[in-house]
Amino acid sequence: MSKPMILLNIDSLMTEPLQYSIKKGKAPAIEFLMNHGTFIPDMVSAFPTMSVTIDSTLLTGTYPDQHHIPALNWYDVKNKQIVNYGTGLRETISVGFSRSVLNMFNRLNNIDLNPNLTTLFEDLNSEGKKSAAINSFIYRGHSKKILRVPLLLRWLTNIGSPITTNAPNYLSLGAFKSIRKRSFAPVLIGGNRKYAGR
């Protein structure tokens, strides 16, 4: 049997603060992984350095000109509208709560992420291997999953029906989707470290 693989993506973690944290004994788990794996301190990120753009590059193996996720906010020339995948409150309000939520949880993976490219999750599925995404906004896979819009967001956005999305075999995304049937995410979007760890 082959060993399972874990791709751990820590958003905004830079080499210098990481090495400082390890020296102070504050990151023993990451130090263990570095000592038993490969650490590349001078890696160059995809540009622009925004989560959805970098994650799309990481999971498709291509740059923004190919995977079609240019930024967290961008102007869609074809539809003449600003696309916001959930940045700050001001941008979300200007685009509209409903549209921002639908952009983040439907449009990003199911429409904008280039359908002519495959993601790591889709590649693994094609090889008969199962995969999971935990609190990752780029998660397109071959399995249909239902994202339940939390009550507070339903009230703010008027999105009453669940959102159907394409995901890996297992998907956990804050209060929208849990791997376990009976669980509660204290943070709507899944930024809670205890919940992610569980």
Image (tube, grey):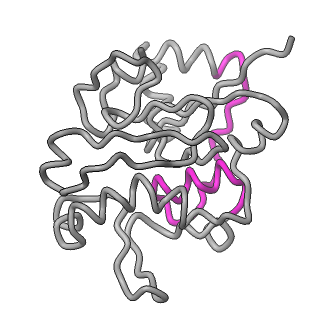
Expressed as whole percent of the image width and height from the top left, the position of residue 18 reads: 47, 31
Q: Is residue 27 above or below residue 53?
A: above
Rendered image quadrant of residue 47: bottom right
- Asked if residue 43 lies in the magenta stretch, the reply is yes
Residue at 45% x, 18% y is 27
Residue 193: x percent and y percent? 34, 24
Instruction: Find residue 7 and report its image quarter.
Output: top right
State the extent of the magenta-drawn residues as a range: 34-62
Quarter of the rendering occupied by the N terminus? top right
Left or right relative to 73: residue 43: right
Report the quarter where the C terminus lies. Answer: top left
Does residue 23 belong to the magenta stretch? no
Q: At 60% from the left edge and 60% from the top edge, which residue is drawn? A: 46
Q: Position of residue 49 (x, y in %)?
A: 49, 59
Determine whether, in the image, residue 117 is placed left or right of residue 143: right
Q: Nearer the viewer, residue 15 or 94?
A: 94
Residue drawn at the location 52% of the way across and 38% of the way down = 15
For the image shown, how many numbered marks are present on the structure?
A: 0
- Front residue of 66/177: it is 177
User: Relative to residue 77, is residue 115 depicted above or below?
Assistant: above
Q: Would residue 45 be found to the left or right of residue 198 on screen?
A: right
Q: Is residue 118 left or right of residue 101?
A: right
Which residue lies at the image location 46% right of the left edge and 62% below the top edge?
Answer: 107
**In terms of image quadrants, where is residue 85?**
bottom left
Q: Please provide percent x and percent y for residue 42.
A: 64, 46
